[in-house]
Image (cartoon, grey):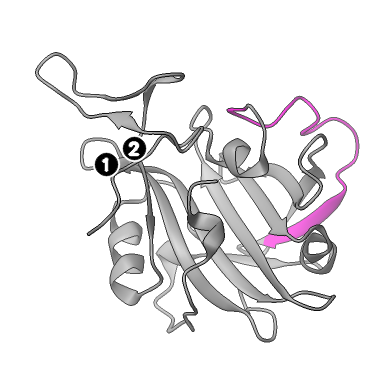
Amino acid sequence: MRAPPTCPRCFGPLQEPNVWSSSWRCGPHGEVLPYTSHRPSDAALTQVRQSATVPLWIPWPLPTGWLVTGFGAAGDERTDIRGSVVAVSGPSITDGPADLLLIAEEPGIGLGAAYAGLAGPDPGDFVGAGPPHVKVSVNGHPTPLWHVPDVPGDRAVYAGEALGRWLWTIAWPADAGLLLVPAQLTLIDFREVEWDVPFGAFSPRLAAE
């Protein structure tokens, strides 16, 4: 049985729509979009892809040894998906596994901030202030990202904009960010391709923290 939707800003429980309101509500955050995670499969990818109004970013080609390990979506049949998460996992530059979340969302959704460990809902004013710390290739175009400060020390977080939406890259452990993000990571929108991709076990990072 699928777990009930949670708040995209805190992963807490939601009050379902009722006769007085068509919106999902979080106690601390009010009206929000319902957030659900999906185990990696072609069926899950198709479901998210068909409803997404934001990109589904995937590093392509995947780094050696890396697999797609799940999806996340903020939105429902009424709103469509306005915040997306693609999880990939593989070996870190040190011993042990690493996880990377690629998040695209409209302003105010709060998914990136929640996974980054910030109050949110959006990146701070540092995005666009001064030269970028790194650049990634987004659909063939160099795209600047800025390092996000004041996040827990177990992760590396970068944020910027792509196709008019927030783009977050969040890596565990922190050294995985040093491997992937500055190395001219190439991102492709899953909505525009029909490739066969390798799936791995469900990423624990997509569970509520």
Tell me which residue sits at (90%, 40%) in the image. 131
The reply to whether residue 103 is in sight is yes
Relative to 23, 114 lies left or right: right
Q: 10 Å neighbourhood of mark 1: few (<14), some, or many (≥20)? A: some
Q: What residue would you read off at disc 2?
A: 34
Q: Residue furthest left?
A: 19
Please give the range of residues in magenta.
120-137
Q: Amino acid at mark 1?
A: Asp
Residue 58, visible in the rendered structure: no
| First in sequence: mark 2 vs mark 1 | 2
**Amino acid at dot 2:** Pro
Q: For the residue labelled by badge 2, is the local secondary structure a helix, a strand or a loop?
A: loop
Q: Residue at x 79, y 60 (%)?
A: 177
Element at label 1:
strand
What residue is shown at x 49% (from left), y 47% (from top)? 208
Residue visible at 56% across and 79% down?
67
Horizontal side, residue 126 vs residue 104: left or right: right
Relative height, residue 98 to residue 158 (above, below): below
Q: Give residue 86's position: percent from left, percent from top.
A: 51, 60
Choose top left, top right, bottom left or bottom right for residue 172.
bottom right
The main secondary structure of the magenta stretch is: loop
Crowd class of label 2 (few under 14; some 14 to 19; many from 20; radius 10 Å): many
Number of on-image labels: 2
| Spot occupied by residue 163 in the image (x, y as percentages of width and height) | 56, 46
CB of mark 2 within 8 Å of CB of mark 1? yes
Does the magenta segment cover residue 199? Answer: no
- Front position in the image: 134 or 93: 93
The residue identified by callout 1 is 76
